[in-house]
Image (tube, rainbow, N blue to C red):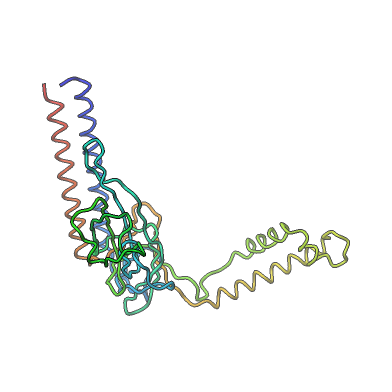
Amino acid sequence: METAQKLLFLLLCLAGALAALWFVFSRMTRYRLIADTPTARVRSAPQGYVELIGHVIAGEDGMLNAPLSGRPCVWYDFKVEELDDDDGRRRWRHVRSGRSNHWFQINDGTGTCLIDPEGAEVSPRHKHSWRGHSAFPAGQDPHAAAAFLTMRSGNGQYRFTERLIFEHEQLYALGHFHTLGGGRDQLNMKATVRDLLRGWKRNPEQLLERFDSNGDGRISPDEWQAARQAAEQQAQTRQRELHQLPSMNVLTDPQTSGMPYLLSTHDEAQLIRRYRWISAGCFTGALFFFWLFLEILLAN
């Protein structure tokens, strides 16, 4: 083996071992968090990073329709691929994909919590793949007559993959819990007044019409003080309106390193087994790449 080729293989093995080790620690982190974080109840959940388990309810916008199959759901992720056999090599080429960011809800019997799926690592139980002869399957093409079950043909140059969460499924959620409304939200009154005044100054004509009491075409110090008082009163009105809002529980992405945002319709025990096996598989891969690295390094 030539020196340059040997060095390339050594670098590839080292990169593979490091990538596998990264996945080991990443999956083990999830495994430990799921196993060690106690399940909170929505009614009494603390503000911060929590684990919730409840049944899915559609959001305020109602049910969604899956883009490919047309099935009613509360969340979807889809992918369309085309079989490309140029140069005699058959491979699937990405055509388009998408993911729902519509909010939905869960209820655990003690209360309801809104779920923001943006940024979440979602692992639903329902994943469907099928092939067809058109880039627009029956659920998406209004001129197609075939129903969802008839789309599952075993051939065709297009492959469709869809992952779905349905209403009434049980959902495991691990993320940042916080409660809005109910008198909890406090405006920064100085910042609110400053923003109001800045906005009024951007429209001088309306500012003069409203506060130029002597009609001289400019805002005097006394008139500016009147504008400030009006801004303070408007800020106080906004604060009162916030206090009157009902409480609303929300689960979102923590956006903090080491605190993943997980949503899954697999139960907690299944998730623990899943991440344990993934960690074990990645560790085996790391050992294999390290063994291969030594074999190449010591080879004559």
Image-quadrant location for residue 256? bottom left
Residue 104: % across, % down: 38, 69
- Image coordinates for residue 230, horizontal then vertical, percent: 73, 69
Location of the N terminus (image quadrant):
top left
- Nearest the eye: 298 or 66: 66
Q: In this rendering, is residue 158 above or below 168?
A: above
- The residue closer to the viewer here, 225 or 196, is 196
User: How many labels were placed on the picture?
Assistant: 0
Residue 13 vertical placement versus 298 (above, below):
below
Specify the quadrant that holds the C terminus. top left
| Along the viewing direction, whichever of 29 and 80 lies nearer the viewer | 80
In the image, residue 14 lies at what x, y percent?
22, 34
- Which residue is found at the position 31% from the left and 68% from the top? 71
Q: Residue at x 51, y 72 (%)?
A: 184
Q: Is residue 186 left or right of residue 215?
A: left
Using the rendered view, name the quadrant where residue 199 is placed.
bottom right
Q: Is residue 16 above or below residue 219?
A: above
Q: Which residue appears at 24% of the width and 41% of the height?
A: 85
* 189 relative to 68 in the view: left or right: right
Where's residue 238, x and y in %? 61, 71
Q: Residue at x 87, y 64 (%)?
A: 215
- Quadrant in which residue 192 is drawn: bottom right
